[in-house]
Image: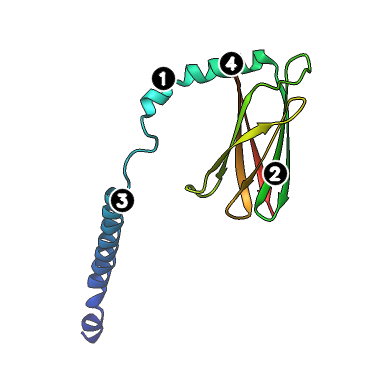
């Protein structure tokens, strides 16, 4: 009889255990539904339709045959850039508009954009100040008339 009285709490412990986890998981579900906006990409349908335009732009860039080099130098958080642009026959392209956008790979809101100044023989140069060391993605865009060339390169500041 004594053993029956002492073990009467066991079924209630099992019920309490499952009730505790139901309350806990209900809270997690509530947090998930009320904090997730439900949208990963803004205007995903329109961007999907524009994908063919992106493929056509890539094909047009390949047909240009432009050759590029990008050299970077670093002094503290200042990054010097020298971008060289040559046409398909190896001749320098001197009359292009070249811009560079640096974006932080792991954190938004610290992007820097500059326009490179033309130098001799297809070289364009400039300096940008980045907020801190680490990985940065450089997106280069060179435009001459209706022709556009884009390139992306990741650099790591020490």
The residue singled out by tag 1 in the image is: 49
The first of marks 1 and 2 along the sequence is 1
- 1 or 3: mark nearer the eye: 1
The first of marks 1 and 3 along the sequence is 3
Say which element carries label 3. helix
Would you call the spot at circle 2 few (<14 residues within 10 Å), some (14-19), or many (20 or more)?
Answer: some
Is 110 on the left-hand or right-hand side of 86? left
Is 102 on the left-hand or right-hand side of 20? right
Badge 2 vs badge 4, beta-carbon distance below 8 Å: no
The residue singled out by tag 3 in the image is: 35
Would you call the spot at circle 1 few (<14 residues within 10 Å), some (14-19), or many (20 or more)?
Answer: few
Question: Residue at position x 64%, y 34% from top?
Answer: 116
Q: Is residue 148 above or below residue 29?
A: above
Badge 3 vs badge 4, beta-carbon distance below 8 Å: no
The first of marks 2 and 3 along the sequence is 3
- 2 or 3: mark nearer the eye: 2
The residue singled out by tag 4 in the image is: 145
The residue singled out by tag 2 in the image is: 80
For the residue pair 41 and 80, the one nearer the viewer reads as: 80
Specify the quadrant of the image occupied by residue 102. top right
Question: Residue at position x 26%, y 56% from top?
Answer: 26
The first of marks 1 and 4 along the sequence is 1
Calculate the distance from the C-alpha at mark 2 to the C-alpha at mark 3. 42 Å
């Amino acid at each position: 009889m004594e053993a029956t009285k002492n073990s009467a709490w066991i079924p209630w412990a099992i019920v309490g255990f499952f009730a505790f986890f139901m309350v806990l998981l209900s809270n997690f579900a509530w947090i998930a539904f009320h904090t997730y906006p439900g949208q990963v990409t803004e205007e995903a349908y329109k961007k999907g339709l524009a994908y063919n335009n992106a493929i056509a732009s890539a094909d047009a860039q390949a047909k240009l045959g432009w050759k590029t080099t990008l050299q970077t130098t670093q002094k503290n958080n200042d990054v010097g850039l020298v971008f060289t642009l040559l046409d398909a026959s190896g001749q320098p392209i001197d009359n292009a508009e070249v811009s560079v956008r640096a974006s932080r790979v792991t954190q938004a809101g610290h992007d820097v954009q500059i326009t490179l100044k033309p130098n001799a023989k297809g070289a364009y140069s400039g300096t940008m100040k980045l907020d801190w060391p680490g990985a940065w993605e450089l997106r280069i865009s060179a435009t001459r008339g209706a022709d556009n060339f884009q390139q992306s390169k990741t650099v790591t500041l020490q």
